[in-house]
């Protein structure tokens, strides 16, 4: 069992939690993920690690409750326990093994979208700690949904916030912000690292391919075991088949077959909706019974 030592709302329907898991915190590196199971009946939820404190032994996760399992996770409070917390899983980001002096010569742009902003933070912080300035584009639907602006602002050389509805920062999606920086302002980047919804990463890659900028993406397909055994997270990278859980989650974005990845991500949508409705019905019945017992 793993204790939730802190829990805080970041935006409507998005919360962060620090989980006491010293072994995971001690070996976590940027780019890796964990699988969390809320309780005996809970499904395995893969989440990219958002931060870790090796001294305190905690790992920070950011969750947007969408399906039945993430909704169950959201009902747990500080002091409660999650049943399983497995990790760190997947390969660390490629740059952690690169020569620091070579990295210093590169101009790097992170592109973070929505909840995908959270896993960008440990990566941007890693560069900051190694004395390398990076730029960050942070995109959200509206001002309410902009998360971690202060934390990212503290580790980025330049932070560019944009919202789809123009309620805060630059008006437009992350792709419009990239075009503004590269095409209109003439900024040069050697590498883009993009994390967010699959559809966003697809369009970022289409643009950066046109602009000739190498791009790394962090894929979040459906996962089951997280150990390369079940095949659920299969993705096509160039003409190779890879498993995101053990070969990724980060890949060369220009080689990813996004159309297949989007199709595979949506294949259990109807089952997910059914399971969410059943869970909500169960909660309603429980509340009515408790109300009736008063
Ligand atoms: P969202 O739909 O609010 O999108 C965030 C931003 O992405 C938008 O503000 C926009 O700037 C950009 N974007 C979206 N669609 C785009 C398009 N077609 N073209 C260009 N830019 C586009 O994001 P959300 O609701 O926070 O996303 C939730 C999704 O993110 C979930 O599906 C979750 O699985 C995924 N996610 C992925 C990771 C990861 O590691 N890749 C991590 C956390 C969450
Ligand atoms: Fe089963 Fe990756 S989650 S192979």
Image (cartoon, rainbow, N blue to C red):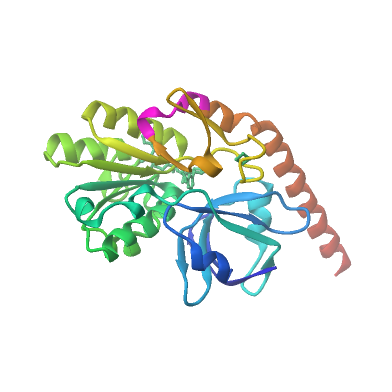
Please tell me which residue is depicted at 78% across the width and 57% down the height of the picture. Answer: 40
Q: Position of residue 77 (x, y in %)?
A: 64, 69
Residue 10 locus on image (x, y percent) = 47, 61
- On screen, residue 116 above or below 272: below
The quarter of the rendering in which ligand 2 is drawn is top right
- Quadrant where the image shows the N terminus: bottom right
Residue 91, percent from left and from top = 47, 49
Is residue 255 shown in magenta? yes
Residue at 21% x, 41% y: name it: 190
Where does residue 97 sit, x and y in percent of width and height? 35, 53
Which residue is painted at 48% across and 24% down in the image?
259
Query: Which portion, as a residue range, is magenta?
Result: 253-260
Task: Report which quarter residue 227 is drawn in.
Answer: top right
Residue 183: name its quadrant: top left
- Residue 175 visible somewhere in the drawing: yes
In the picture, measured across the screen, residue 226 lies left or right of residue 115, that is: right
Residue 8 visible, this angle: no
* Prevailing SS of the magenta stretch: helix
Q: Is residue 198 magenta?
A: no
Q: Is residue 254 above or below residue 95?
A: above
Vertical arrangement, residue 193 with respect to residue 131, above or below: above
- Please state if 115 lies on the left or on the right of 294 as rendered: left
């Amino acid at each position: 069992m793993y204790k939730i030592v802190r829990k805080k709302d970041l935006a409507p329907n998005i919360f962060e939690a620090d989980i006491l898991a010293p072994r995971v915190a001690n070996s976590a590196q940027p780019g890796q993920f964990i699988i969390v199971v809320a309780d005996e009946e809970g499904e395995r939820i893969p989440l990219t690690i958002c931060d870790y404190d090796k001294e305190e032994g905690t790992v920070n996760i950011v969750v947007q409750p969408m399906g039945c399992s993430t909704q169950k996770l959201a009902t747990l409070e500080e002091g409660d326990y999650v049943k399983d917390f497995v990790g760190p899983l997947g390969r660390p980001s490629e740059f952690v093994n690169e020569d620091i002096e070579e990295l210093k010569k590169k101009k790097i742009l992170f592109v973070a979208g929505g909840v995908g902003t959270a896993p960008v933070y440990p990566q941007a912080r890693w560069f900051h700690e190694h004395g390398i300035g990076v730029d960050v584009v942070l995109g959200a639907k509206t001002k309410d949904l902009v998360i971690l602006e202060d934390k990212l602002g503290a580790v980025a050389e330049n932070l560019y916030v944009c919202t789809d509805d123009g309620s805060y920062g630059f008006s437009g999606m992350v792709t419009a912000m990239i075009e503004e920086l590269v095409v209109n302002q003439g900024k040069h980047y050697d590498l883009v690292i993009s994390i967010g919804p699959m559809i966003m990463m697809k369009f970022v890659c289409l643009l950066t391919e046109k602009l000739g900028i190498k791009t790394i993406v962090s894929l979040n397909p459906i996962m089951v075991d997280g150990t390369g055994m079940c095949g659920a997270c299969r993705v096509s990278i160039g003409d190779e088949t890879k498993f995101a859980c053990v070969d990724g989650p980060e890949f060369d974005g220009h080689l990813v077959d996004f159309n297949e990845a989007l199709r595979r991500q949506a294949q259990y949508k109807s089952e997910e909706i059914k399971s969410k409705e059943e869970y909500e019905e169960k909660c309603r019945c429980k509340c009515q019974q408790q109300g009736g017992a008063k």
